[in-house]
Amino acid sequence: MPYTIQKRVGGEFDAVVETTIESLENEGFGVLCDIDVQQTLKKKLDEDFRRYRILGACNPQLAHRALQEEIELGALLPCNVIVYEDDDGVTVSAVDPEQLVGMADNPALDSVAAEVHERFERVLAAVEAGGGTDDGRTE
């Protein structure tokens, strides 16, 4: 069962990351943490790894609504969005909130999960349309 929603996009990696952050902000999400996995693995393990960033995204209003329904849901927050590079380009992938809150087995969370899912779909569409390029071109 897929647990992410994703898009492969054209463009330079750092520009895709910036476009992703901007698109998240446009949908009301703040990026609470930004983990550079490549840098961390190099520093901690002296291992080479592809360019890979984990963005911990949170929409305070939606998080508040969800936490009012399920106090333990905080263990699943923030929602992670990843950006990584491979031989075919750059992929932006977000956790599917509907799958995530399904673990809580609380129907009161369904509407919040659906709204977050819709917002993440718009974020991915905006990143795809922007192509992550820093010169305004789409790939």
Image: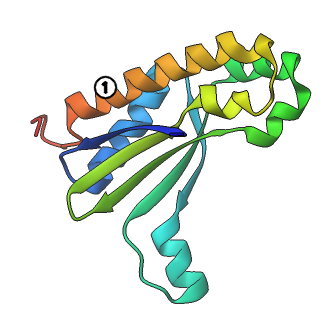
- Identify the residue shown where x is 46% and y is 71%: 38
Residue nearer the viewer, 107 or 17: 107
Q: Place residue 65 in its image quadrant.
A: top right
* Residue 39 coordinates in the image, percent (x, y): 49, 73
Q: Residue furthest bottom?
A: 46
Quadrant where the C terminus lies? top left
Residue shown at 48% from the left, 86% from the top: 47
Front one among 75 and 134: 75
Q: Residue 67 occupies which quadrant of the picture?
A: top right
Indicate left or right for 78 with 13 as reference. Answer: right
Q: Quadrant of residue 74?
A: top right
Q: Name above or below for residue 53 compared with residue 63.
A: below
Outermost residue, right direction?
A: 71
* Image vertical order of residue 21 relative to residue 123, above or below: below
Q: Which residue is mark 1?
A: 125
Question: Looking at this rendering, what residue extends furthest in the front direction?
Answer: 1
Q: Quadrant of the N terminus?
A: top right
Mark 1 neighbour class, 10 Å CA radius: few under 14, some 14 to 19, many 20 or more: some
In the image, 82: left or right of 9? Answer: right
Residue 7 in sight in this render:
yes
- x, y percentage for residue 121? 41, 24
Judging from the image, what secondary structure is the residue with disc 1 in?
helix
Q: Where residue 32 sits: x, y (%)?
A: 63, 42
